Image (cartoon, rainbow, N blue to C red):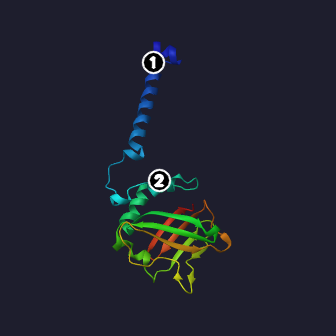
Amino acid sequence: MLLGHLFGGSVHHQHRGLRRAGLMASCLLVCAPGAQADVPQPQPPKSQAGASSTTQHLASPHVVARSQFADRYYALRFGVDQMRVRYTASGASVEFRYRVLDPDKAAMLSDKNATPYMIDEQTGIKLLVPVAEQIGALRQTAPPEQWREYWLLFANAGKIVKPGQRVDVSIGSFHVRGLTVE
């Protein structure tokens, strides 16, 4: 009776509201990102375990975090993680970076015969890796090594791709969608 007077309703309605609140609270605990089953995550060697670039990557105001499922998929299927895209050289180029977890699976990303594309999701325009006469293609094609970070530069003529936009990257059979340009 006292609960009914305090909250302006019958005791029966108060208990139903408390049950709903308890259900919502338990859902928050179960659905929280940290509450998922522990899945072993690849760890860098102790010498590189300092400040995580993933934390810095997610701190950018334009970045949309990918799901943990997507991150695990790329790690298991293609042997890479920490994929990100940055606007560089005052917008004249856009850089795609990734870290290698499994050199055998990631070898396709450094294949000289695979043509890399960056596709702007808004317009569908494909950006290509420029080829300089003296240097060659502006991408790393050495055999990948575990825990190392690799990059590719895409020419952004006309500054079509801008920070905050979403792009897809395609290299042979490797395709990643919805990367946000930092």
Instruction: Judge whether 181 appears above or below 145 on screen.
Output: above
Q: Which residue extends farthest right? A: 158
Q: Which residue extends farthest front? A: 47
Kind of residue at badge 1:
Val
- At label 2, counting other C-alpha atoms closer than 10 Å, the crowd grade (few under 14, some 14-19, many 20 or more) is few
Q: Position of residue 14 (x, y in %)?
A: 46, 22
Which residue is label 1 attached to? Answer: 11
Residue in the image at 41% along x and 57% along y: 69
Which residue is label 2 attached to? Answer: 55
- At label 1, counting other C-alpha atoms closer than 10 Å, the crowd grade (few under 14, some 14-19, many 20 or more) is some
Q: Quadrant of residue 118?
A: bottom right
Q: Nearer the viewer, residue 171 or 23?
A: 171
Residue in the image at 43% along x and 39% along y: 28
Report helix, strand or loop for mark 1. helix
Q: Where is residue 172 in the image (x, y as percent from the top left)?
A: 45, 77
Instruction: Judge whether 11 appears above or below 23 on screen.
Output: above
Q: Position of residue 158 (x, y in %)?
A: 68, 72
Kind of residue at badge 2:
Thr
Q: Sequence-wise, which precedes: disc 1 or disc 2?
A: 1
Q: Nearer the viewer, mark 1 or mark 2?
A: 2
Residue in the image at 41% along x and 34% along y: 23
Q: Which of 95 and 106 is in front in this view?
A: 95
Report helix, strand or loop for mark 2. helix
Tally of numbered tags: 2
Q: Quadrant of residue 129?
A: bottom right
Q: In which quarter of the image is the N terminus?
A: top left
- 111 left or right, relative to 61: left
Residue in the image at 58% along x and 69% along y: 94
Q: Can residue 92 be seen in this view?
A: yes
